[in-house]
Amino acid sequence: MMQKPRFIDPTLTMADQDNFKPNGSAYTLSQVSQYLSYVGLDESYHPSSHPVLALDYLTTIFQAQITSFPYENLSIHYNPFHRILLDPQHLFTKLVTSSRHGRGGYCMELSIFFSHILRALGFSSIHYSGVRNRNRTNGTPQGPYNGYVHLVNILTLPNTNPAQQYVLDAGFGGDGPTFPLPLTEHLIHHNTIGTQQIRYTRDWLPDQRFRDESKGALKHWIYEYRNSPEKPWNSYYAFVPEHEFTELDFENLNFYLSECERNHQTYTVLVIRFLRGGEEGEQKIKGKVMMVQGEVKQNLGGRTELVKVCRTEEERTEVLKEVFGINLTEEEKGAIRGWASELRGK
């Protein structure tokens, strides 16, 4: 018999725990219990313990999230249907309750899943915003901003005066913020790993023609980085937090990102996992390990180093298991045969 979750609100019956979904979340309090157990957080973080929904609480939840669920697009490649499903219950099963622990998802999956978790934890003022990324050349973002190809959560922290909004980017991979980033212009932050600094600026995009703010034109918030204080700033992506994205927007983005042959996601296997360190119970991020197609790299606080080059599918699936903790079924392993992303031993 399946054991009931250990975080129980004494004011609710077990049936209530299994059915109550706070703040429009798709997840019940029982599912919150399963989530917290999976990411290694104790019962003090459960709504039944009435935690204060302050920045330190939000930061702990966020860092537990990004170190427990890797950015990965394996469902595009190692999946008989080669399709990403965004239904919140499907995501919960894939990420939390599946017997094959270790899975994550790409930006759409992780951001949608995390939004429902946050709402179930008690955060009520949260919405999605679409993001325009820049393409990379030799790893460096360059050129114009694309159409919407990414998704973040915008959260207003309760009981802040004036109200403070934070951007929660749980699905940008190794270059994303490693903590809730306040929506404040020109405030420079250290991004936990190495010497990288990040900030937001606010400006018009080069191809924006409507720029009359008195008539409602909105500048974009731009996520910028530099790898050390001596380096120039460069930008990863831009978004307008006042533009809320909804389920219909998700479906359009998801179709392009996961099924359009022109998009790099469909021909490149990507996996990025943040590594958690520190004393027991701490959520400190100590580094990251990454796979791009067959190359495996790691960064433990200094420079990024090449660890291994996989040349066959057998080598890659073994690395997925040993390095990233991701176990694929035999059916999933076979699904990549004949696809552009398959490693053929060359």
Image (cartoon, helix red, strand yellow):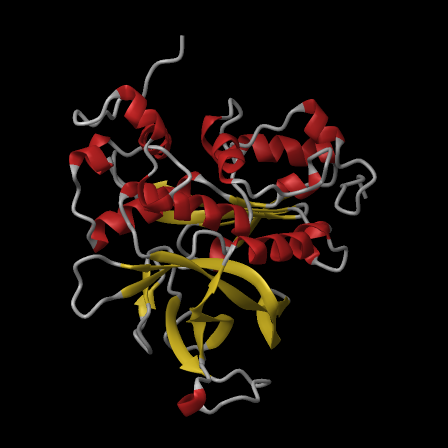
How far across and how far down the image is residue 194, in percent? 38, 59
Image position of 297 with respect to 77: above or below = below
- In the image, 174 versus 239, the foreground residue is 239
Give the residue at the far top of this rendering.
1
Give the residue at the far right of this rendering.
338
Q: In what quadrant of the picture does the C terminus appear?
A: top right
Residue appearing at x 75%, y 29% in the figure = 334
- In the image, 37 versus 153, the foreground residue is 153
Left or right: residue 16 versus residue 193 is: left
Left or right: residue 241 versus residue 210 is: left
Q: How many marks?
A: 0
- In the image, 163 versus 135, the foreground residue is 163
How far across and how far down the image is residue 250, in percent? 57, 54
Residue appearing at x 65%, y 55% in the figure = 257
How far across and how far down the image is residue 118, in percent? 34, 46
Residue appearing at x 69%, y 35% in the figure = 79
- In the image, 108 versus 191, the foreground residue is 108
How far across and how far down the image is residue 219, in percent? 45, 81
Q: In what quadrant of the picture does the N terminus appear?
A: top left
